[in-house]
Image (spheres, rainbow, N blue to C red):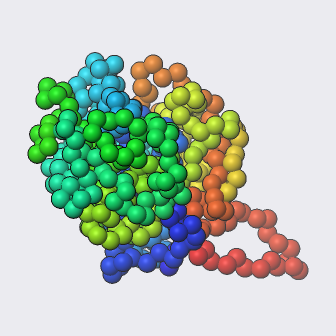
Protein backbone atom coordinates (compact mmCIF):
# COMPACT_ATOMS: atom_id res chain seq x y z
CA UNK A 1 0.00 0.00 0.00
CA UNK A 2 1.02 3.60 -0.40
CA UNK A 3 1.36 6.06 2.43
CA UNK A 4 0.31 9.68 2.92
CA UNK A 5 0.86 12.26 5.58
CA UNK A 6 -2.45 12.68 7.44
CA UNK A 7 -3.14 16.21 8.69
CA UNK A 8 -5.40 15.02 11.51
CA UNK A 9 -3.12 12.32 12.97
CA UNK A 10 0.03 14.31 12.11
CA UNK A 11 1.88 11.25 10.91
CA UNK A 12 2.36 9.18 7.78
CA UNK A 13 -0.45 6.65 7.44
CA UNK A 14 -0.80 3.56 5.30
CA UNK A 15 -3.73 3.96 2.93
CA UNK A 16 -6.11 1.05 2.61
CA UNK A 17 -9.64 1.47 1.23
CA UNK A 18 -12.30 0.96 3.87
CA UNK A 19 -14.52 -0.99 1.52
CA UNK A 20 -12.96 -3.56 -0.78
CA UNK A 21 -10.68 -2.33 -3.53
CA UNK A 22 -12.50 0.97 -4.10
CA UNK A 23 -10.76 4.10 -2.86
CA UNK A 24 -13.14 7.02 -2.31
CA UNK A 25 -11.65 10.51 -2.50
CA UNK A 26 -13.19 13.97 -2.19
CA UNK A 27 -11.50 17.20 -3.25
CA UNK A 28 -12.82 20.67 -2.54
CA UNK A 29 -13.47 22.16 -5.97
CA UNK A 30 -13.08 25.69 -7.31
CA UNK A 31 -15.08 28.78 -6.46
CA UNK A 32 -16.59 29.70 -9.83
CA UNK A 33 -16.17 33.48 -9.79
CA UNK A 34 -12.61 33.91 -11.09
CA UNK A 35 -9.85 32.12 -12.97
CA UNK A 36 -7.90 29.56 -10.96
CA UNK A 37 -4.23 30.50 -10.69
CA UNK A 38 -1.43 27.96 -10.73
CA UNK A 39 -1.29 27.92 -6.94
CA UNK A 40 -4.94 26.82 -6.85
CA UNK A 41 -4.32 24.22 -9.54
CA UNK A 42 -1.44 22.74 -7.58
CA UNK A 43 -3.95 21.37 -5.06
CA UNK A 44 -5.78 19.54 -7.84
CA UNK A 45 -2.52 18.09 -9.11
CA UNK A 46 -2.07 16.64 -5.62
CA UNK A 47 -5.38 14.80 -5.93
CA UNK A 48 -4.51 13.67 -9.46
CA UNK A 49 -1.16 12.27 -8.29
CA UNK A 50 -2.81 10.36 -5.44
CA UNK A 51 -5.36 8.92 -7.84
CA UNK A 52 -2.86 7.80 -10.45
CA UNK A 53 -0.59 6.31 -7.81
CA UNK A 54 -3.50 4.34 -6.35
CA UNK A 55 -4.65 3.09 -9.74
CA UNK A 56 -1.40 2.27 -11.49
CA UNK A 57 0.96 1.28 -8.68
CA UNK A 58 -1.52 -0.30 -6.30
CA UNK A 59 -4.23 -1.48 -8.70
CA UNK A 60 -7.09 0.16 -6.85
CA UNK A 61 -10.29 1.45 -8.35
CA UNK A 62 -10.75 5.12 -7.41
CA UNK A 63 -14.02 7.03 -7.15
CA UNK A 64 -13.64 10.80 -6.89
CA UNK A 65 -15.89 13.77 -6.27
CA UNK A 66 -15.00 17.43 -6.77
CA UNK A 67 -17.66 20.05 -6.22
CA UNK A 68 -18.19 23.37 -7.97
CA UNK A 69 -18.89 26.22 -5.54
CA UNK A 70 -21.27 28.52 -7.40
CA UNK A 71 -23.15 29.82 -4.35
CA UNK A 72 -22.42 30.57 -0.71
CA UNK A 73 -18.76 31.62 -0.80
CA UNK A 74 -19.01 34.78 1.27
CA UNK A 75 -16.53 37.61 1.64
CA UNK A 76 -17.46 37.64 5.35
CA UNK A 77 -19.61 35.07 7.10
CA UNK A 78 -21.80 37.55 8.92
CA UNK A 79 -22.23 40.47 6.56
CA UNK A 80 -20.28 39.72 3.41
CA UNK A 81 -21.72 39.40 -0.07
CA UNK A 82 -21.63 36.20 -2.08
CA UNK A 83 -18.48 36.47 -4.24
CA UNK A 84 -20.28 35.05 -7.28
CA UNK A 85 -22.93 37.77 -7.08
CA UNK A 86 -20.37 40.52 -6.53
CA UNK A 87 -18.27 39.48 -9.52
CA UNK A 88 -21.33 38.94 -11.71
CA UNK A 89 -22.41 42.51 -11.04
CA UNK A 90 -18.90 43.78 -11.81
CA UNK A 91 -18.79 41.88 -15.13
CA UNK A 92 -22.39 42.61 -16.14
CA UNK A 93 -23.57 38.98 -16.17
CA UNK A 94 -26.07 36.90 -14.28
CA UNK A 95 -24.66 34.85 -11.44
CA UNK A 96 -25.06 31.55 -13.25
CA UNK A 97 -23.63 32.92 -16.52
CA UNK A 98 -20.55 33.98 -14.63
CA UNK A 99 -20.27 30.71 -12.72
CA UNK A 100 -20.52 28.58 -15.86
CA UNK A 101 -17.90 30.69 -17.63
CA UNK A 102 -15.32 30.24 -14.87
CA UNK A 103 -16.26 26.61 -14.40
CA UNK A 104 -15.51 26.01 -18.09
CA UNK A 105 -12.23 27.90 -17.80
CA UNK A 106 -11.25 25.77 -14.81
CA UNK A 107 -11.97 22.55 -16.67
CA UNK A 108 -9.93 23.77 -19.64
CA UNK A 109 -6.97 24.57 -17.40
CA UNK A 110 -7.22 21.14 -15.76
CA UNK A 111 -7.24 19.54 -19.19
CA UNK A 112 -4.14 21.52 -20.19
CA UNK A 113 -2.39 20.13 -17.10
CA UNK A 114 -3.61 16.60 -17.90
CA UNK A 115 -5.67 16.33 -14.70
CA UNK A 116 -8.20 13.54 -14.79
CA UNK A 117 -11.78 14.78 -14.26
CA UNK A 118 -13.70 13.53 -11.24
CA UNK A 119 -16.49 11.02 -11.67
CA UNK A 120 -18.78 13.37 -9.78
CA UNK A 121 -18.63 17.17 -10.22
CA UNK A 122 -21.80 18.47 -8.57
CA UNK A 123 -22.65 22.15 -8.71
CA UNK A 124 -23.74 23.44 -5.34
CA UNK A 125 -26.62 25.45 -6.79
CA UNK A 126 -28.19 22.30 -8.26
CA UNK A 127 -28.25 20.32 -5.01
CA UNK A 128 -29.66 22.71 -2.42
CA UNK A 129 -32.38 20.20 -1.57
CA UNK A 130 -29.70 17.86 -0.18
CA UNK A 131 -28.30 20.67 1.93
CA UNK A 132 -31.70 21.64 3.32
CA UNK A 133 -32.29 18.01 4.26
CA UNK A 134 -28.90 17.79 5.99
CA UNK A 135 -29.45 21.02 7.90
CA UNK A 136 -32.88 19.83 9.06
CA UNK A 137 -31.23 16.65 10.39
CA UNK A 138 -28.61 18.66 12.27
CA UNK A 139 -31.31 20.85 13.84
CA UNK A 140 -33.29 17.78 14.89
CA UNK A 141 -30.20 16.18 16.44
CA UNK A 142 -29.36 19.32 18.42
CA UNK A 143 -26.24 20.22 16.45
CA UNK A 144 -27.72 23.31 14.78
CA UNK A 145 -30.33 25.97 15.51
CA UNK A 146 -32.35 28.49 13.48
CA UNK A 147 -32.32 32.18 14.30
CA UNK A 148 -35.21 34.66 14.17
CA UNK A 149 -34.04 36.10 10.85
CA UNK A 150 -34.24 32.71 9.10
CA UNK A 151 -30.57 31.75 9.20
CA UNK A 152 -29.23 28.51 10.69
CA UNK A 153 -26.00 28.07 12.67
CA UNK A 154 -24.03 25.01 13.69
CA UNK A 155 -23.57 24.72 17.44
CA UNK A 156 -19.78 24.38 17.71
CA UNK A 157 -19.95 23.26 21.34
CA UNK A 158 -22.01 20.23 20.34
CA UNK A 159 -18.94 18.70 18.63
CA UNK A 160 -16.30 18.00 21.31
CA UNK A 161 -13.42 17.08 18.97
CA UNK A 162 -13.58 20.33 17.01
CA UNK A 163 -10.03 21.46 16.25
CA UNK A 164 -8.34 18.11 15.65
CA UNK A 165 -7.33 19.13 12.13
CA UNK A 166 -5.87 22.54 12.90
CA UNK A 167 -4.99 22.34 16.58
CA UNK A 168 -7.44 25.13 17.43
CA UNK A 169 -9.66 24.71 20.46
CA UNK A 170 -12.98 26.41 21.02
CA UNK A 171 -11.92 27.66 24.45
CA UNK A 172 -8.93 29.41 22.89
CA UNK A 173 -10.78 31.08 20.01
CA UNK A 174 -11.59 34.72 20.59
CA UNK A 175 -14.77 36.39 19.44
CA UNK A 176 -14.00 38.39 16.33
CA UNK A 177 -10.64 36.71 15.77
CA UNK A 178 -9.61 36.18 12.17
CA UNK A 179 -10.89 32.80 11.04
CA UNK A 180 -9.43 32.50 7.56
CA UNK A 181 -10.59 33.47 4.09
CA UNK A 182 -14.27 34.29 3.97
CA UNK A 183 -14.63 34.03 7.76
CA UNK A 184 -13.15 37.21 9.15
CA UNK A 185 -14.32 36.91 12.72
CA UNK A 186 -17.32 34.98 13.91
CA UNK A 187 -18.66 37.59 16.20
CA UNK A 188 -22.02 39.18 15.43
CA UNK A 189 -24.92 37.51 13.67
CA UNK A 190 -28.43 38.09 15.01
CA UNK A 191 -29.46 35.22 17.25
CA UNK A 192 -26.04 33.57 17.25
CA UNK A 193 -25.44 31.80 20.55
CA UNK A 194 -21.66 31.39 20.61
CA UNK A 195 -18.94 33.32 18.80
CA UNK A 196 -17.42 30.17 17.23
CA UNK A 197 -20.70 28.93 15.74
CA UNK A 198 -20.83 29.14 11.97
CA UNK A 199 -23.50 29.59 9.37
CA UNK A 200 -25.08 26.64 7.56
CA UNK A 201 -27.81 28.70 5.91
CA UNK A 202 -28.03 32.45 5.47
CA UNK A 203 -31.31 34.30 5.13
CA UNK A 204 -31.78 36.53 2.09
CA UNK A 205 -34.56 38.41 0.31
CA UNK A 206 -36.57 36.27 -2.09
CA UNK A 207 -35.76 38.57 -5.03
CA UNK A 208 -32.01 38.05 -4.62
CA UNK A 209 -30.31 35.77 -7.15
CA UNK A 210 -29.42 32.30 -5.91
CA UNK A 211 -31.96 31.91 -3.11
CA UNK A 212 -34.22 29.00 -2.21
CA UNK A 213 -37.13 28.45 0.17
CA UNK A 214 -36.43 26.43 3.31
CA UNK A 215 -38.46 25.52 6.44
CA UNK A 216 -36.65 28.18 8.48
CA UNK A 217 -36.72 30.89 5.79
CA UNK A 218 -35.65 31.87 2.27
CA UNK A 219 -31.92 32.03 1.76
CA UNK A 220 -28.93 30.07 0.55
CA UNK A 221 -26.44 27.47 1.86
CA UNK A 222 -22.98 28.49 3.04
CA UNK A 223 -20.04 26.76 1.39
CA UNK A 224 -19.16 24.59 4.40
CA UNK A 225 -22.61 23.04 4.13
CA UNK A 226 -22.28 22.06 0.49
CA UNK A 227 -19.10 20.02 0.87
CA UNK A 228 -20.61 17.85 3.61
CA UNK A 229 -23.87 17.29 1.75
CA UNK A 230 -22.31 16.59 -1.64
CA UNK A 231 -19.51 14.33 -0.43
CA UNK A 232 -21.92 12.21 1.64
CA UNK A 233 -24.32 11.94 -1.27
CA UNK A 234 -21.79 10.96 -3.95
CA UNK A 235 -19.24 8.96 -1.96
CA UNK A 236 -21.17 7.65 1.03
CA UNK A 237 -20.58 7.96 4.75
CA UNK A 238 -17.01 6.59 4.67
CA UNK A 239 -14.50 8.58 2.59
CA UNK A 240 -10.95 7.30 2.43
CA UNK A 241 -9.14 10.52 1.49
CA UNK A 242 -10.12 14.18 1.54
CA UNK A 243 -7.74 16.60 -0.19
CA UNK A 244 -7.43 20.35 -0.39
CA UNK A 245 -5.09 23.29 0.00
CA UNK A 246 -3.67 23.97 3.46
CA UNK A 247 -5.64 27.22 3.62
CA UNK A 248 -8.85 25.15 3.76
CA UNK A 249 -7.80 23.23 6.86
CA UNK A 250 -9.30 25.91 9.09
CA UNK A 251 -12.03 26.83 9.25
CA UNK A 252 -13.52 25.12 6.19
CA UNK A 253 -12.41 21.54 6.78
CA UNK A 254 -12.84 21.78 10.54
CA UNK A 255 -16.44 22.87 9.96
CA UNK A 256 -17.04 20.26 7.27
CA UNK A 257 -15.73 17.49 9.52
CA UNK A 258 -17.98 18.57 12.38
CA UNK A 259 -21.03 18.67 10.11
CA UNK A 260 -20.44 15.33 8.38
CA UNK A 261 -19.56 13.47 11.57
CA UNK A 262 -22.56 14.93 13.38
CA UNK A 263 -24.89 13.83 10.58
CA UNK A 264 -23.58 10.26 10.49
CA UNK A 265 -22.58 9.75 14.11
CA UNK A 266 -19.06 8.59 13.18
CA UNK A 267 -15.80 9.77 11.63
CA UNK A 268 -16.53 10.10 7.90
CA UNK A 269 -13.11 11.01 6.47
CA UNK A 270 -10.37 8.51 7.28
CA UNK A 271 -7.42 10.57 6.00
CA UNK A 272 -7.04 14.32 5.45
CA UNK A 273 -4.30 15.36 3.00
CA UNK A 274 -3.40 19.01 2.42
CA UNK A 275 -1.05 20.67 -0.06
CA UNK A 276 0.94 23.73 0.97
CA UNK A 277 0.79 27.22 -0.49
CA UNK A 278 2.68 28.11 -3.63
CA UNK A 279 5.04 30.95 -2.79
CA UNK A 280 6.27 33.60 -5.19
CA UNK A 281 8.90 35.96 -3.88
CA UNK A 282 8.36 34.55 -0.39
CA UNK A 283 4.63 35.25 -0.38
CA UNK A 284 1.59 33.09 -0.90
CA UNK A 285 0.25 33.41 -4.43
CA UNK A 286 -2.92 35.49 -4.18
CA UNK A 287 -4.75 38.24 -6.00
CA UNK A 288 -4.20 40.58 -3.06
CA UNK A 289 -0.42 40.08 -3.35
CA UNK A 290 -0.55 40.87 -7.09
CA UNK A 291 1.57 37.82 -7.84
CA UNK A 292 -1.01 35.65 -9.57
CA UNK A 293 0.06 33.53 -12.55
CA UNK A 294 -2.52 31.81 -14.76
CA UNK A 295 -2.08 28.84 -17.05
CA UNK A 296 -2.61 31.32 -19.89
CA UNK A 297 0.54 33.15 -18.80
CA UNK A 298 2.60 30.01 -19.38
CA UNK A 299 1.32 29.74 -22.94
CA UNK A 300 2.05 33.43 -23.52
CA UNK A 301 5.65 32.79 -22.50
CA UNK A 302 5.91 29.90 -24.94
CA UNK A 303 5.77 27.23 -22.24
CA UNK A 304 3.76 24.04 -22.47
CA UNK A 305 1.35 23.88 -19.50
CA UNK A 306 2.58 20.33 -18.96
CA UNK A 307 5.93 21.86 -18.03
CA UNK A 308 4.24 23.29 -14.95
CA UNK A 309 2.89 19.87 -14.05
CA UNK A 310 6.33 18.32 -14.44
CA UNK A 311 7.98 21.12 -12.46
CA UNK A 312 5.56 20.57 -9.59
CA UNK A 313 6.16 16.83 -9.62
CA UNK A 314 9.94 17.31 -9.65
CA UNK A 315 9.90 19.32 -6.44
CA UNK A 316 10.62 17.56 -3.16
CA UNK A 317 8.43 20.26 -1.62
CA UNK A 318 10.03 20.06 1.83
CA UNK A 319 11.73 23.43 1.29
CA UNK A 320 10.36 26.73 0.13
CA UNK A 321 11.50 27.90 -3.29
CA UNK A 322 12.14 31.39 -4.53
CA UNK A 323 11.09 33.16 -7.74
CA UNK A 324 12.81 31.48 -10.67
CA UNK A 325 11.42 30.65 -14.07
CA UNK A 326 14.20 28.15 -14.72
CA UNK A 327 12.52 25.07 -13.20
CA UNK A 328 9.45 25.44 -15.40
CA UNK A 329 11.58 26.10 -18.48
CA UNK A 330 13.76 23.05 -17.76
CA UNK A 331 10.64 20.96 -17.25
CA UNK A 332 9.39 22.21 -20.61
CA UNK A 333 12.48 20.71 -22.22
CA UNK A 334 11.72 17.45 -20.46
CA UNK A 335 8.15 17.46 -21.76
CA UNK A 336 9.41 17.90 -25.31
CA UNK A 337 11.92 15.08 -24.91
CA UNK A 338 9.32 12.70 -23.50
CA UNK A 339 6.89 13.57 -26.27
CA UNK A 340 9.56 12.97 -28.91
CA UNK A 341 10.45 9.59 -27.41
CA UNK A 342 6.77 8.63 -27.37
CA UNK A 343 6.31 9.72 -30.98
CA UNK A 344 3.92 12.48 -30.01
CA UNK A 345 3.98 16.24 -30.26
CA UNK A 346 3.99 18.37 -27.12
CA UNK A 347 0.68 20.11 -27.11
CA UNK A 348 1.50 23.32 -25.32
CA UNK A 349 1.71 26.93 -26.30
CA UNK A 350 -1.29 28.79 -27.55
CA UNK A 351 -2.80 25.77 -29.28
CA UNK A 352 -4.12 24.49 -25.95
CA UNK A 353 -7.75 25.43 -26.05
CA UNK A 354 -9.48 27.05 -23.15
CA UNK A 355 -6.36 28.67 -21.73
CA UNK A 356 -7.99 32.06 -21.59
CA UNK A 357 -7.03 35.34 -20.04
CA UNK A 358 -9.42 37.25 -17.87
CA UNK A 359 -10.25 40.70 -19.25
CA UNK A 360 -7.91 43.18 -17.64
CA UNK A 361 -5.42 40.55 -16.48
CA UNK A 362 -1.99 42.10 -16.82
CA UNK A 363 -0.08 38.97 -17.71
CA UNK A 364 0.78 37.74 -14.24
CA UNK A 365 3.85 37.86 -12.09
CA UNK A 366 7.20 36.50 -13.15
CA UNK A 367 6.92 32.73 -13.21
CA UNK A 368 8.45 31.26 -10.07
CA UNK A 369 9.50 27.90 -8.79
CA UNK A 370 6.88 26.10 -6.74
CA UNK A 371 7.22 26.25 -2.99
CA UNK A 372 7.99 23.09 -1.15
CA UNK A 373 5.91 21.64 1.61
CA UNK A 374 6.32 19.14 4.35
CA UNK A 375 6.89 16.98 6.01
CA UNK A 376 9.63 15.96 3.62
CA UNK A 377 7.51 14.77 0.72
CA UNK A 378 5.28 16.19 -2.06
CA UNK A 379 2.33 17.60 -0.12
CA UNK A 380 2.76 14.71 2.29
CA UNK A 381 3.02 12.02 -0.39
CA UNK A 382 5.76 9.51 0.32
CA UNK A 383 7.01 9.17 -3.24
CA UNK A 384 10.65 9.67 -4.13
CA UNK A 385 11.67 11.49 -7.28
CA UNK A 386 14.54 9.69 -9.00
CA UNK A 387 16.65 12.09 -11.06
CA UNK A 388 18.92 10.86 -13.89
CA UNK A 389 22.48 10.15 -12.91
CA UNK A 390 25.62 9.74 -14.92
CA UNK A 391 26.46 6.07 -15.54
CA UNK A 392 28.80 4.72 -12.89
CA UNK A 393 32.20 3.46 -14.00
CA UNK A 394 32.05 -0.22 -14.88
CA UNK A 395 34.65 -1.03 -12.29
CA UNK A 396 32.47 0.53 -9.58
CA UNK A 397 28.84 -0.16 -10.35
CA UNK A 398 26.47 1.78 -8.22
CA UNK A 399 23.76 0.12 -6.10
CA UNK A 400 20.40 -0.49 -7.68
CA UNK A 401 17.67 1.93 -6.79
CA UNK A 402 15.02 0.64 -4.42
CA UNK A 403 11.45 0.75 -5.74
CA UNK A 404 9.24 3.62 -4.63
CA UNK A 405 7.00 2.79 -1.72
Image x and y of residue 240, in percent: 39, 69
- Outermost residue, right side: 395
**Count of numbered labels shown in the rendering:** 0
Q: Using the image, determine if residue 391 lies above or below residue 119.
A: below
User: Position of 190 compared to 164: left or right?
Assistant: left
| Residue 38 percent location from the top left of the image | 52, 41
User: Which residue lies at the image location 87% right of the left edge and 79% below the top edge?
Assistant: 396
Question: Is residue 3 shown above or below 257?
Answer: below
Tell me the residue at 28%/46% (across/down): 153
Left or right: 140, with 80 as reference point:
left
* Viewer-side residue, 255 vs 140: 140
Q: Is residue 338 visible?
A: no
x then y, percent, for residue 289: 58, 29
Against 204, residue 275 (above or below) is: below
Dividing the image into 4 quarters, which one contains the C terminus?
A: bottom right
- Residue at left 46%, top 54%? 170
Task: Say which of 199 and 237 sits in front.
Answer: 199
- Residue 197 visible to the viewer: yes
Most foreground residue, 387 or 404: 404
Rendered position, 22 above or below 108: below
Residue 230 x, y percent position in the rendering: 26, 55
Closest to the observer, 318 or 363: 318
Quadrant of the image occupied by residue 234 = bottom left
Horizontal side, residue 390 vs residue 280: left or right: right
Q: Residue at x 47, y 50 (%)?
A: 250
Amino acid sequence: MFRLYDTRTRQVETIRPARGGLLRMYSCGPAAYRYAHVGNLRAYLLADLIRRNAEHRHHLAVLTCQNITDVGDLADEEAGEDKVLAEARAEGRTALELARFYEDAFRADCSALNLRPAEHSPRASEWTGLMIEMIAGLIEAGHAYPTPDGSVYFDARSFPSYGELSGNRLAELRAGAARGAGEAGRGGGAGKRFHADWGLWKSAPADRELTWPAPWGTGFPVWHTECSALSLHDLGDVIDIHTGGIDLRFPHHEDERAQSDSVTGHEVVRHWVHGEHLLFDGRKMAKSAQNVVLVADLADRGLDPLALRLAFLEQGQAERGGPDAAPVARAGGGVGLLAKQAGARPGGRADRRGVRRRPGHSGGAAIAAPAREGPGCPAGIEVRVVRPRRPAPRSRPGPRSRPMS
